């Protein structure tokens, strides 16, 4: 039985990835500190659903030595590092949280992988690292040095840290940049959750940039399939195609995982209204600090690596799945 260690396993993406790996016959050790950035009870409910083959470790990846001890004990074939402090807006108010979780936490994971190398180390990054780049769809090989939030800056720093460790110690490392992820068991601080809750409570929704936002909305089931499929494709020495982001000096690669389509926020809201059968009252607002007007993934490298394209769940279908989950979970 293959063994995976997933950090952030009680988080939105970590839960779905752990569930998929268990379905595929892996044993999964999940590490999460159940932080109170949002409702820890939601995180506990996610963990409780994972069942046989899952071992939960409640702890903070930034704790010195914890990850090294866990890798020594469990000897995972793959380490998937998802634990992070998320949220663009929160990084303006509480930047130290991002230093501790995203920089120190990633450092501890890298040190653990150096001491006890897995066959493949995979680390979550974000489309936010593309920052002010306006040439879309985003390709992994374009320069990305204009981050517009401290959250994005810490994730870009994590990519650079991982490259240095891959070069120095030879651990095959893939950084995957995911886009706007949504779906059942989603985070309460994200737009879909907030919109559904507000509409059901008869409250207006805040629509930034007067609705002229565009996002590459990526259904969580599609995303975690991409992560799981990448586990068996660690970077080596040879590029897979002309668009490969493989480092010339390290077994290190950056891969976009998105839907490959940019969708206007208005269409996303219409999908929510259709699933709820209720119209939203829209409070049109200016752009928020640190945000970007659009994101759009070029997923050609991912297709080259996997030999096939990922499913591309339409927003209407994915939003309905979230609404069905929300109504069941919150009896709304």
Image (cartoon, rainbow, N blue to C red):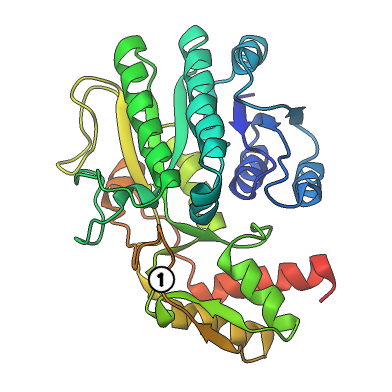
Residue 299 is situated, as x and y percent measured from the top left of the image, at 31, 53
Q: Residue drawn at (36%, 10%), measured in percent from left and top? A: 169
Q: Quadrant of the C terminus?
A: bottom right
Q: Is residue 51 above or below residue 215?
A: above
> For the N terminus, which image quadrant?
top right
Q: Quadrant of residue 209?
A: bottom left
Left or right position of 201 against 2: right
Q: Compare residues 201 and 252 and report the one nearer the observer.
A: 201
The residue beneath circle 1 is 287
- Extreme left residue here? 242
Q: Is residue 69 above or below residue 194?
A: above
Classify mark 1: residues with Cα within 10 Å, few (<14), some (14-19) or many (20+): some
Q: Position of residue 221 (x, y in %)?
A: 56, 56
Element under disc 1: loop
Taking 186 as reference, is 264 left or right? left
Q: Residue at x 32, y 29 (%)?
A: 160
Residue positioned 52% across, 10% down in the render: 116
Q: Position of residue 57 (x, y in %)?
A: 74, 27
Asked if one can make out residue 235 in the rendered structure from this viewpoint, the answer is no
Q: In this rendering, does residue 189 appear at all? A: yes
Residue 287 % position (x, y)? 40, 71
State the residue in front, 212 or 261: 212
What's the residue at 59%, 73% (across, down)? Answer: 319
């Amino acid at each position: 039985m293959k063994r995976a260690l997933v950090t952030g396993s009680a988080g939105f993406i970590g839960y779905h990835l752990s569930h998929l790996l268990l379905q595929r016959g892996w044993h999964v050790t999940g590490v999460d500190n159940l932080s109170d950035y949002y409702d820890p009870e939601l995180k506990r409910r996610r963990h409780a659903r994972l069942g046989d083959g899952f071992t939960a470790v409640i702890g903070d990846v930034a704790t010195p030595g914890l990850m090294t001890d866990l890798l020594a004990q469990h000897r995972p074939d793959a380490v998937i590092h998802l634990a992070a402090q998320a949220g663009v807006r929160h990084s303006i108010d509480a930047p130290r949280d991002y230093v501790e979780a995203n920089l120190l936490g990633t450092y501890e994971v890298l040190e653990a992988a150096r001491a006890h190398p897995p066959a493949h180390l995979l680390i979550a990054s974000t489309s936010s690292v593309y920052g002010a780049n306006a040439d879309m769809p985003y390709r992994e090989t374009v320069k990305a040095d204009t981050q517009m939030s401290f959250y994005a800056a810490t994730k870009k720093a994590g990519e650079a840290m991982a490259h240095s460790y891959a070069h120095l110690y030879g651990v095959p490392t893939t950084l995957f940049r995911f886009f706007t992820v949504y779906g059942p068991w989603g985070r309460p601080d994200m737009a879909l959750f907030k919109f559904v809750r507000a509409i059901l409570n008869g409250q207006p929704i805040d629509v930034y940039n007067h609705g002229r936002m565009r996002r590459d909305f990526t259904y969580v089931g599609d995303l975690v399939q991409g992560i799981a499929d990448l586990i068996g494709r660690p970077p080596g020495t040879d590029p897979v195609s002309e668009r490969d982001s493989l480092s010339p000096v390290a077994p290190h690669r950056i891969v976009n995982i998105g839907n490959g389509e940019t969708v206007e926020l208005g269409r996303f809201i219409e999908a929510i209204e259709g699933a709820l059968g209720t119209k939203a009252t829209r409070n049109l607002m200016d752009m928020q600090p640190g945000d970007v007007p659009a994101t759009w993934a070029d997923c050609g490298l991912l297709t080259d690596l996997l030999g096939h394209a990922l499913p591309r769940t339409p927003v209407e279908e994915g939003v309905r799945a979230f609404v069905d989950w929300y109504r069941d979970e919150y009896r709304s």
